[in-house]
Image (cartoon, rainbow, N blue to C red):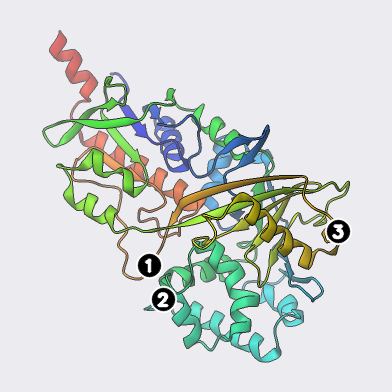
């Protein structure tokens, strides 16, 4: 009996995770990607001869499925993880402040450094502690996250010096637009679930290397080969048609695509999924890469810091003098010229890093993703993996993984999609390939 064949459409993390999971279960997998790059939102490309990521993606210790994915792709040695959670917080006119985890069980692990945290008054620290207790007791609060913070007595100082630096990048949206349940999920998962949950990690190689290693586990990878249509028969897909009008037969299809790309494939056969996908809105992310002529690291051994009261939420030092400024929820800045973005980011860095005040960057690059992630707005319904077609399933950060639009959500969605496909294939009496062979005989 021949192994079933599955087409995975989209080579982002969701598609790659689905492909590896299917392959691990004995399924033959062909991956279709309309661009020349693997990794989707987590990839790399060359800018003026330098390979840069299309965004500074980080992973937390609680992202267990993504960490497993990196292991399976054989790239764990290329992932740098903190031994414990520790973050430097930079604010103009103030000494650097630090938040770190102690050797205590969660949530007490944050208490010692938080009590010494100089950027909040004692009154504000008590308010933050009250909100953390509320989050532990109320996992599904109504309304938006900004309103929830207001209800729990969080001042503007609490927002600026604690909540916004962590929640806005995690959710990539203004907190007034985010469902409170999603914001509380971040708090509970990262800060309350375990001492190691908020540890921060990032890849030490361009993200494309991770994607390439994962794609190598599939049976075939077709780059610059989008899928323009599904070949349908009796309420199921029996193949795909590529942009080059080539027809290929498959036993199932995984659509690992953003919501706006589903309509051309599912229009006329799954109106409900198309309508659900149309309800999603997005927010951009901008990353500004600045290179300075300095021989030593500017951010010390940690390699990153959060900025307060700045358009730059986080800065990462990729190499001595190479700083990547991350601007989440960047609707107000995504259209700015490269020179203006560089000016603003340099000014923000110089305000908190005195060594840069007499310098100017000798190289600048900007990466923009206008539709980086979906906005987890109040009342938004995220679909599960199944569609109206019995052997066509969905994957992507926007599907119902329970996580915000992160690398963890992408991997979870791909693995859920793979499990759904395998369950579907087991219920089928014979694969399409076997049926076709029988007809030929």
What quarter of the picture does the N terminus occupy?
A: top left
Say few, some or many: other residues with alpha carbon within 10 Å of mark 1 (under 14 / 14 to 19 / 20 or more). Answer: many
The residue wearing badge 2 is: 144
Q: Residue 358 bears which disc, if any?
A: 3
Q: Residue at horizontal 61%, vertical 69%?
A: 165
- 397 up-or-down from 220: above or below: below
Mark 2 vs mark 3, CA separation in Å: 43 Å
Whether label 2 touches label 3, CB < 8 Å: no
Mark 1 vs mark 3, CA separation in Å: 43 Å
Q: Residue at horizontal 59%, vertical 87%?
A: 127
Residue 421 placement: quadrant: top left
Can see residue 286?
A: yes
Residue 315 placement: quadrant: bottom right
Whether label 1 touches label 2, CB < 8 Å: yes
Task: Give the side of residue 438 with respect to residue 347, left or right.
Answer: left
Can see residue 193?
A: no
Callout 3 secondary element: loop
The residue wearing badge 1 is: 377
């Amino acid at each position: 009996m021949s192994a079933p064949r599955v087409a995975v459409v989209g080579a982002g993390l969701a598609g790659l995770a689905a492909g590896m999971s299917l392959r691990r279960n004995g399924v033959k997998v062909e991956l279709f990607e309309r661009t020349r790059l693997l990794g989707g939102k987590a990839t790399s490309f060359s800018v003026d001869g330098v390979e840069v990521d299309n965004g500074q993606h980080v992973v937390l210790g609680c992202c267990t499925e993504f960490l497993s994915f990196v292991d399976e792709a054989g790239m764990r040695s290329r992932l740098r993880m903190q031994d414990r959670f520790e973050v430097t917080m930079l604010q103009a006119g103030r000494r650097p402040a630090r938040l770190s985890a102690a050797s205590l069980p969660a949530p007490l692990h944050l208490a010692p450094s938080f009590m010494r945290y100089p950027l909040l008054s004692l009154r504000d620290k008590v308010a933050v502690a009250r909100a953390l207790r509320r989050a532990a007791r109320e996992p599904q609060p109504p309304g938006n996250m900004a309103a929830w913070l207001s209800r729990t007595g969080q001042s503007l100082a609490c927002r600026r010096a604690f909540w916004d630096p962590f929640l806005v990048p995690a959710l990539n949206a203004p907190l007034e637009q985010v469902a409170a349940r999603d914001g509380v999920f971040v708090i509970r998962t990262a800060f309350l679930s375990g001492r190691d949950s908020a540890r921060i990690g990032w890849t030490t190689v361009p993200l494309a290397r991770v994607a390439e290693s994962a794609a190598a586990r599939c049976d075939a990878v077709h780059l610059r080969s989008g899928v323009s249509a599904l070949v349908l028969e009796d309420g199921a897909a029996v193949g795909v048609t590529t942009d080059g009008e080539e027809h290929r037969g498959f036993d199932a299809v995984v659509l690992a695509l953003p919501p706006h790309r589903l309509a051309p494939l599912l229009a006329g056969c799954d109106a409900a999924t198309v309508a659900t996908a149309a309800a999603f809105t997005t927010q951009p992310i901008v990353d500004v890469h600045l290179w300075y002529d300095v021989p030593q690291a500017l951010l010390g051994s940690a390699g990153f810091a959060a900025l307060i009261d700045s358009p730059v939420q986080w800065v990462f030092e990729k190499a001595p003098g190479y700083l990547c400024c991350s601007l989440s929820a960047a609707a107000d800045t995504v259209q700015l010229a490269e020179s203006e973005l560089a000016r603003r980011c340099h000014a923000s860095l110089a305000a908190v890093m005195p060594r840069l005040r007499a310098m100017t960057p000798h190289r600048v690059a900007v990466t923009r993703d206008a539709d980086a992630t979906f906005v987890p707005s109040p009342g938004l319904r995220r679909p599960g993996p199944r569609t109206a077609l019995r052997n066509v399933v969905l994957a992507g950060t926007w599907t119902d993984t329970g996580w915000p639009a992160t690398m963890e959500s992408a991997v979870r969605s791909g693995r859920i999609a793979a499990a759904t496909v395998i369950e579907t294939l087991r219920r089928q009496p014979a694969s399409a390939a076997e049926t076709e062979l029988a007809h030929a005989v």
